[in-house]
Image (cartoon, helix red, strand yellow):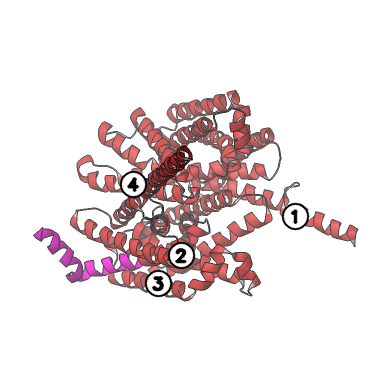
Amino acid sequence: MSMDFWILLTGSLAAVSCAVLGCFLILRRMALMGDAISHSVLPGIVVAYMISGSRDSILMLVAAAIMGLLCVFLIQWFNNRGIQSDASIGVIFTSLFAIGVVLVSLNARQVDLDLDCVLYGEIAYTAWNTLQIGGMDLGPRSVWLLGGTLLLVLTVIGLFYKQFKLCAFDPMLALALGIPAALFHYLLMGLVSVATVSSFESVGAILVVGLLVIPPSTAYLLTDRLGAMILISAACGVASTVLGFALAVWLDASIAGCIVAAAAILFAVTFLLSPKHGLLFARLRRTRLSRSTA
Amino acid sequence: MMQLWDSLAALATDPNLRWIALGCMLLGLSSGMIGCFAYLRRQSLMGDTIAHTALPGICVAFLLTGVKSLPVFMLGAIVAGIAGTLAIRVITARSRIKADAAMGIVLSSFFGIGIVLLTMIQHSGDGSQSGLDKFLFGQAASMVGSDVQLMAGVSLLLTFVCTLLFKEFKLLAFDPAFAKGSGFSTSLLDFIMQALVVTAVVAGIQAVGVVLVAALLITPAVSARFWTERLDRMIMLSGAFGMISGLLGAWISSQVFQLPTGPVSVLAAAFVFLVSVLFGTKRGLLTMRLTRSRARQQLQALQGSTASVKEAG
């Protein structure tokens, strides 16, 4: 029972951090930044592993966060030099990931690096890692880590809420008012890096990407106010965690996969039934309108 | 130096290596060509999304047929990829969610569902599922002859279709409204192009893996953009860059023990990209700097001559 509690708590903490940050990402049309960051941390993780020789080190977290920020910086640099942002994201994160894979394969013999954990662990074997970690050290360590991350995210967003809001909706006006938009861009991306890295260690990369995009999009279909959007998004994240965990127990399948699937189900329901922007109500409004004009 | 030549010659003579090198080159060629259109239509990350949507397709194909065979996996992946692109289109067309978020939603939900299916297959205790993940992580060096032949055949087909429909795709990329006005079915063309992207991605997954397959589409196309302003040249260059990356990947990985072909190909493409960013004749950093300093000199010369004219007057 208490094991289930720890799993739910870890999942929810990660979900809330990601869901809050994701709102700003999708408003700034950078939803895939989380995907890019979560993949480009691989070389950082490998180098940290080669130096420290263990998988549970602060060094690994720091190295991964540095790689995440480097990825953001490079994407921005190439974007400023005339490469479309989507292309620049694609080129940078695949190159960094390829460096990571090559480092893993080159050092596999000397360093005895577990390919399953470093490379596969974050892609398809997320389930195995989550389950194993859930059994053994999903206790305080990852909860503390994710709790700290959430506190950091909420503090920074809370302190600079107005600035982030303005940068999300009208970066030109923000610049004209003297708000350093570039600084807030990097601050946001730094938070995304930290959230990605700390969540990814315990819940896996694909879950991070899913939680950064799906709950905020669900919230985006339900409200037009940023404050409400953040709250709904966080609630969706927690709901997906609980629902997904129940699904995973029922199906005897990957927890991370089930949480993403649950988030997707919530999104699909909202997409169809949202009173504001849902498919069904839009169609109803249209028929009513055409009837009233006819 | 002799060793270098020997190793290069081995690519041509060693039958296994020859197939892998040829397969990687053809894959690079076709993805590079198709990637140009994806780049111009601002769909560079479509490749990444489609690669992730392949997972549930492969799992369902395995669950339905119970066999581990490459053609079945590819078929399942292609169907799932097309479903994914349709889902993205429905989400962006029928709600206010933007393309990037729609791609993120489809990418992570399909992959999440795929992981659920994969773990269900694994937990069911069927011993024969081990090939599923191999397909996803890409191991060009371990591909057998028939796999490579299939990949090469698909790549040739893609190159052929892309060449055949060059004019139509060009129109669609630059002026879809005009294309529609001229009587082309833009939705059909759009669908064909998406199907080509899906097929290219699926063919590439087994060689380089889910995460890196996006690079085969984007990186050569972005690199080619630095050298030319013409689409036909861009496509040829991009195809050539893709081929070179594939060849380098196959060659270098055959030389170093345990070095995987896919990531090395991607790094070779990244190297070509860096060279293009610096030295590209149209948009390269060096060219831009030269043009700017030349313009400044001309301006100064002009200002100098007007000043002397004024003094004389």
Q: Residue at x 61, y 59 (%)?
A: B89
**Quarter location, residue A239:** top right
Labels 1 and 3 share a subunit: no
For the record, the magenta segment spans B1-27
Q: Which mark is residue A222?
A: none
- For the residue marked with disc 3, what is the amino acid? Val
Using the image, name the chain to which the residue with label 3 belongs. B
The spot of residue A46 in percent (x, y) is 31, 39
Question: Which mark is in front, 4 or 1?
Answer: 1
In the image, taking residue B279 as reference, residue B102 lies left or right, namely: right
User: Where's residue A22, x and y in %?
Assistant: 56, 39
Residues flagged by tags 3 and 2 on a common chain: yes
Q: Which residue is mark 1?
A: A280
| Circle 2 residue | B231
Q: Nearer the viewer, residue A179 or A216?
A: A179
Q: Which mark is residue A116?
A: 4
Residue under mark 1: which chain is it in?
A
